Image (tube, helix red, strand yellow):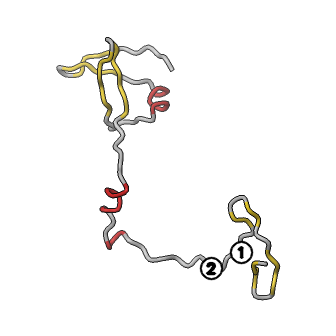
Amino acid sequence: MATVTQIARWGNSLGLRLPKSVALEAQVGEGDTVDVSVKNGAIVVRPNRPTHSLKQLVAKIMPRNRHNESDWGHRSATRCGNRRIRTRRRRSGLVDV
């Protein structure tokens, strides 16, 4: 999406105000950090999104934010992904055939 906006003075620096439609499309909001660079004379502004590895995420698991298993009760689904599970009804509930 191309749009025209104006550069304004912000203290000793210059500021660029992003229209709401551009911010929504770029998925950025107030307080987000961006990478600013110049490529072939054009100002390039990109969202700075951190990448996380599984090792980093697992390292953040602590006993206080770890949960026990949950009992979801007996299985009553008749579909598993795209495959239909054949079942028949018994007094005790559904049973795989």
Q: Which amino acid does the dot numbered 1 rest on?
A: Ser
In the displayed image of the protein, which residue is found farthest to the bottom? 91
Q: Which amino acid does the dot numbered 2 rest on?
A: Gly
- Say which residue label 1 marks: 76
Element assignment for label 2: loop
In the displayed image of the protein, which residue is found farthest to the top? 41
Q: Give the side of residue 29 with respect to residue 79, left or right.
A: left
In the displayed image of the protein, which residue is found farthest to the left? 12
Q: Where's residue 42, x and y in %?
A: 34, 14
Q: In front here: 15 or 89?
A: 89
Residue 47 position (above or below residue 1): below
Q: Kindly indicate the quadrant of the structure image that contains residue 87.
A: bottom right
Element assignment for label 1: loop
Q: Where's residue 89, x and y in %?
A: 82, 81
Residue shown at 49% from the left, 27% from the top: 21
Residue 96 position (above or below residue 27): below
Q: Where's residue 65, x and y in %?
A: 36, 69
Q: CA distance from mark 2 to mark 1?
A: 9 Å
Residue shown at 32% from the left, 15% from the top: 7
Q: Where's residue 38, x and y in %?
A: 30, 18
Residue 54 position (above or below residue 77): above
Residue shown at 24% from the left, 21% from the top: 10
Q: Which mark is residue 40?
A: none
Q: Kindly indicate the quadrant of the structure image that contains residue 85.
A: bottom right
Callout 1 crowding tier (Cα within 10 Å): few <14, some 14–19, many ≥20: few
- Say which residue label 2 marks: 73
* Callout 2–callout 1 Cβ contact below 8 Å: yes
